[in-house]
């Protein structure tokens, strides 16, 4: 069971966090492509994913995005080559998440901004990546952004994730019970991030925290799972360097603790092309 939790955790981090971004949306005809590598690990497992994210503003304050489209190189136990069964075949393509974001108030210097975002999770990932469990779902969020100065900005988000019921392809047994269907409970996300930019050296550093909590219990084989009242907290730090107005490199480290996705650490590296 933990293997499946860890796979879900790795996929959850493949675009950094829930929505692609929770800072000002930007002006019309701006676009950005992110080439990402995500390494997730703990004492027992490790996962490496190469997702691609694309966003485009067809008009002022309105953003369309494609997230998490990529390839999982592996997700396997530590020293699995020494096991009798060898390393599991957990590699393949990850499906895209489609996103829409709208900023209600145009960006103004030192003014608070509000935006809304909706993500759609497509159940199209390779079975080797998901073990056959790949639910369709939605994530909706409200965002509050405060520009304190040209150097200091705060972004925050409150959202809800809803996943539909889905089958495990072959089912799996846990504590003597065969699991065939699962419907995850409604999940709440609250997060915030503070960024500071050193303009003379084109460098930004940030700190952030995410809190995720199940509002309702999961259903397994149509019955409520009373042990699914789970939560997760993630702490992250990062830095980025702007080479030119077109190219930027980001590195992000996150430490995650909780029952929802298990304790683990994550390193994201993101090379962005903006045009």
Image (tube, rainbow, N blue to C red):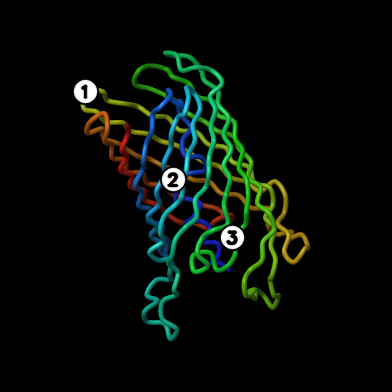
Secondary structure state at the residue bearing disc 2? loop
Image location (x, y in percent) of residue 54 = 41, 41
Q: Residue furthest right?
A: 223
Q: Residue at x 65, y 51 (%)?
A: 163
Report which residue position mark 3 lands on. 134
Specify few, some or many for label 3: CA neighbours under 10 Å numbering under 14, 14-19, or 20 or more. many
Secondary structure state at the residue bearing disc 3? loop
Q: Residue at x 53, y 67 (%)?
A: 127
Residue 49 or residue 63, whichever sits in front: 63
Image location (x, y in percent) of residue 272 = 32, 39
Specify few, some or many for label 2: CA neighbours under 10 Å numbering under 14, 14-19, or 20 or more. many
Specify few, some or many for label 1: CA neighbours under 10 Å numbering under 14, 14-19, or 20 or more. few
Report which residue position mark 1 lands on. 200
Q: Is residue 200 left or right of residue 144?
A: left
Dot 1 or dot 3: first in sequence order is 3
Image quadrant where one finds the C terminus: top left
Report which residue position mark 2 lands on. 16
Dot 2 or dot 3: first in sequence order is 2
Q: Is residue 42 above or below residue 214?
A: below
The reply to whether the C-beta atoms of the residues labelled 2 and 1 are less than 8 Å apart is no
Q: Is residue 114 above or below residue 66?
A: above
Q: Is residue 272 left or right of residue 139?
A: left
Q: Residue at x 68, y 54 (%)?
A: 164
Total labels drawn:
3
Q: Nearer the viewer, mark 1 or mark 3?
A: 3
Secondary structure state at the residue bearing disc 1? helix
Residue 222 or residue 135, whichever sits in front: 135
Image location (x, y in percent) of residue 181 = 70, 66
Please identify the quarter of the rendering in which residue 83 is found: bottom left
């Amino acid at each position: 069971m933990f293997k499946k939790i860890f796979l879900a955790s790795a996929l959850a981090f493949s675009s950094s966090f829930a929505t692609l971004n929770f800072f000002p949306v930007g002006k019309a005809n701006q676009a950005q492509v992110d080439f990402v590598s995500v390494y997730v690990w703990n004492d027992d497992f490790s996962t490496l994913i190469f997702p691609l994210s694309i966003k485009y503003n067809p008009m002022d304050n309105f953003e369309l995005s494609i997230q998490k489209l990529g390839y999982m190189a592996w997700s396997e136990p530590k020293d699995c080559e020494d096991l009798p069964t060898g390393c599991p075949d957990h590699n393949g393509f990850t499906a895209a998440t489609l996103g829409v974001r709208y900023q209600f108030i145009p960006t103004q210097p030192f003014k608070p901004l509000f935006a809304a975002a909706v993500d759609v999770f497509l159940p199209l990932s390779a079975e080797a990546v998901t073990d056959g469990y790949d639910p369709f779902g939605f994530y909706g969020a409200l965002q509050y952004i405060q520009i304190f100065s040209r150097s200091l900005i705060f972004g925050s988000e409150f959202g809800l994730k809803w996943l539909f019921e889905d089958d495990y392809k072959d089912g799996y047994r846990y504590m003597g019970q065969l699991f065939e269907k699962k419907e995850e409970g409604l999940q709440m996300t609250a997060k915030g991030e503070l960024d500071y930019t050193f303009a003379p050296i084109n460098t930004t550093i940030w700190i952030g925290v995410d809190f995720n909590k199940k509002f309702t219990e999961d259903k397994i084989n149509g019955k409520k799972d009373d042990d699914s009242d789970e939560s997760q907290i993630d702490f992250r730090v990062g830095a980025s360097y702007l080479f030119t107005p077109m190219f930027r490199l980001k590195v992000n480290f996150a430490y995650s603790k909780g029952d929802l996705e298990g304790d683990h650490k994550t390193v994201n590296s993101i090379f962005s092309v903006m045009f």
